[in-house]
Amino acid sequence: MKKKPIIIGIESSCDDTGVSIIRNRNVLSNIIIHQKIHKKYGGVVPELASRQHDLNITKAVKQAILLSKVSINQIDAVSFTLGPGLIGPLLVGASFAKSFSMGLEIPLLTVNHIQAHILSHFIQNANINNSYPKFPFLSLVISGGHTQIIQVDDFFKMKILGSTLDDSVGEVLDKIARALGLDYPGGPMIEYFSKNGNNKKFIFSKPTVTGLDFSFSGFKSDVIRFLKKRLNKNMFFIKQNLSDICASIQKTTAEILSEKVQKAILKTGIYRIALAGGVSANYEIIRTFMSFEKKDKRCKIFILKKEYTTDNGAMIAITGLLKYEKNLFDSIHVTPYSKFKTF
Ligand code: AMP
Ligand code: MG
């Protein structure tokens, strides 16, 4: 095996076309083309997303190669997201990756999207800690499609300890933001407007699910019911209280997540926690988890730099690289899957 393999990673599971080139865990380029078309619909429209990927993927690959300063013939393998995700968008990435692999006669590496979010901590300097989490650690994956606590015993030895029983946390923040009249994606908008808000002003209900599973639909309904009730009495309620509402929503969200992770720590005796996924960019969530380290010296919290939180090609490339190092190659006959299977 070559000492410093160069891997291209292609991500197309939802509404971001991500292409990255890495050499030996170092990111040489990481191009993300966000699809703005979904803004006016308040959520991702799968057919439009597939078409946008189709339009953007060649551009993203060309840019990533150019920026990386490697020549196309130096690339050792191509990795891409096989699932879970939206099937149309996944098929665009898969078809491109397969053609790329056949054209250049280089190996193909398939990637589980959730595993990739977790393994993004193994990109050189990807987290604010500038260090790799030691095994075993717990990962909290919080994104537009997933909310899970996963025990990570090794790169490809992971087990799910808890999952959402209904909506994902990102999806709920996006829906609440929509009810507040904010743009999609809603998570960053809620964060933006919460800046000067009083996070204790409004109290929202927290789920009562036992064990390590999550539930977010009750919280979402509670917030939306509350908004409707207040708007009936005062049509300017949201406008007059936006900062306090956003800050209170964020606080409740951070509490729901952190209380479950605390339970997971007690259950497993594992004190290293690595956050991943788009929602882990949220400052209130980061602040809440960082406070663990002050409360208990055994805790070590790993926070990704912003560019590696939401879907990106680098997380696919690093997972591909780790598979390449173990000779875990895939056949051209693989086909994408939309629902999570196993790791
Ligand atoms: P992903 O599926 O990993 O690409 O993450 C996308 C999700 O992350 C969307 O639901 C966004 O609303 C959410 N998100 C992104 N940035 C933030 C943020 N700063 N605070 C809260 N949610 C966020
Ligand atoms: Mg994701």
Image (cartoon, grey):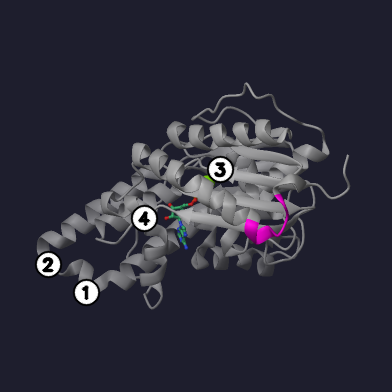
Q: Which residue is mark 4?
A: 36
Magenta part of the chain: 66-71
Q: Are marks 2 and 1 in contact (CB under 8 Å)?
A: yes
Q: Which residue is mark 3?
A: 148
Foreground disc of the pair 3, 4: 4
Q: Is residue 200 left or right of residue 317?
A: left
Disc 2 and disc 1: Cα gap in Å? Answer: 10 Å
Q: Tag 3's secondary structure?
A: strand
Tag on residue 240? 1
Asked whether mark 2 and ligand 1 are closer than 8 Å, the reply comes as no
What amino acid does circle 3 point to?
Gln
Q: Are marks 2 and 3 in contact (CB under 8 Å)?
A: no
Q: Earlier in the sequence, mark 1 or mark 4?
A: 4
Q: What is the x, y in percent for residue 329?
A: 75, 30
Foreground disc of the pair 1, 4: 4
Q: What is the x, y in percent for residue 231?
A: 15, 61
Q: Earlier in the sequence, mark 2 or mark 4?
A: 4
Foreground disc of the pair 2, 3: 3
Q: Is residue 166 above or below residue 42?
A: above
- The quadrant where residue 203 appears: bottom left
What amino acid does circle 4 point to?
Lys
